[in-house]
Image: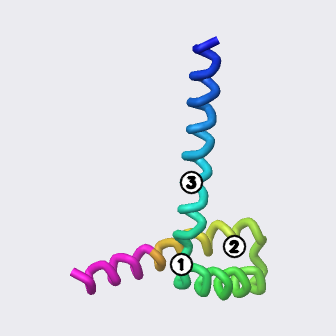
Amino acid sequence: MAATTKFVAVLLMCMAVMAAVQVQEAQAIGEVYKTCYGGCHKDCVSAGNGSTFCEMKCDTDCAAKEAAAKVAAFKNRV
């Protein structure tokens, strides 16, 4: 009985940690990414590319721009 209780407790803790990580990832999307992605995806699709290709391309490009903006902001604070 005690082993089952411990297993359930560990399982619930893992679920709580995973939920917290997903919330943190969702909050990490910044304004640079949002503005970049909207325009990029619209332009890419209107150029005749498929939606999946455009999602992958714009996600990669805009994530790189977001990371560069965060590094620049960090350097300005230091």
Q: Tell me the kind of residue under disc 3.
A: Ala
Asked where in the image residue 34 lies, by quadrant, the reply is bottom right
Q: Which SS type dominates the magenta stretch?
A: helix
Extreme residue toward the left, this view? 78
Label 1 secondary element: loop
**How far is mark 1 from mark 3, CA to CA?**
18 Å
Q: Are marks 1 and 3 in contact (CB under 8 Å)?
A: no
Q: Nearer the viewer, residue 44 or 11?
A: 11
Q: Give the residue drawn at x 56%, y 69%.
A: 27
Asked where in the image residue 53 lies, by quadrant, the reply is bottom right
How crowded pointer 2 is (Cα within 10 Å; few <14, some 14-19, many 20+) is rated as many
Image location of residue 42, percent across then percent down = 73, 85
Q: Give the residue drawn at x 56%, y 73%.
A: 29
Q: Which residue lies under the disc numbered 1?
A: 30
Q: Which residues are magenta?
A: 67-78
Of the numbered discs 1 and 3, the one sitting upstream in the chain is 3
Can you say which quadrant of the picture contains the C terminus? bottom left
Residue 54 has which mark? 2
Can you say which quadrant of the picture contains the N terminus? top right
Q: Are marks 3 and 2 in contact (CB under 8 Å)?
A: no
Q: Which residue lies under the disc numbered 3?
A: 20
